[in-house]
Image (cartoon, rainbow, N blue to C red):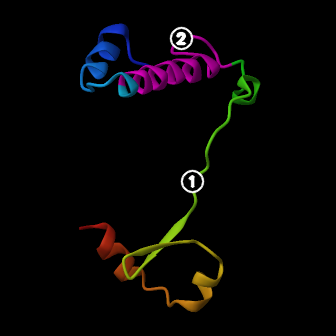
Amino acid sequence: MPLDQVEAEKLASCVHNAGAKAKVAEAVELVREMDKAFGGAARPARRRLMNLQMDFIVPLLCVREAGILFEFESTFLLEHPWEIERILSVHNH
């Protein structure tokens, strides 16, 4: 849900230089555009995201090994034993 004007101003007041304020304003406007693209709160979604012709970023899946992040490759599935208990205990801390 996009920020209203008061919320956007409060958010902008949290940053102090002009570059950061511009980034905040850009992010607020981007969220508003995305909300409109998906139909907003009261309208049925008719436009598709691709109609906006906007770039987007897909983050890379990474694996942390010995404190270093590596781009995920299928070999990680083959080279390392799967220990679900260890994975769950790391994410529950």
- For label 2, the residue is 42
Q: Nearer the viewer, residue 15 or 32?
A: 15
Residue 19, percent across and down? 40, 26
Residue at the image point whose x is 27% and y is 67% from the top: 92
- For label 1, the residue is 59
Above or below residue 85? Residue 12 is above
Image quarter of the C terminus: bottom left
Q: Left or right of 67: which side holds 50?
A: right
| 31 in the magenta segment | yes
Ranked by sequence position, the earlier of labels 2 and 1 is 2
Q: Amino acid at mark 1?
A: Pro
Where residue 50 sits, quadrant-wise, is top right
Q: Amino acid at mark 2?
A: Ala
For the record, the magenta segment spans 21-45
Mark pair 2, 1: CA separation: 31 Å
The residue furthest front is 18
Answer few, some or many: residues within 10 Å of disc 1's Cα (few below 14, many 20 plus, some between 14 and 19).
few
For the stretch drawn in magenta, what is the main secondary structure? helix
Above or below residue 38? Residue 60 is below
Which is in the foreground here, disc 2 or disc 1? 1
Above or below residue 31? Residue 91 is below
Residue 27 appears in the picture as rendered: yes
Answer few, some or many: residues within 10 Å of disc 2's Cα (few below 14, many 20 plus, some between 14 and 19).
few
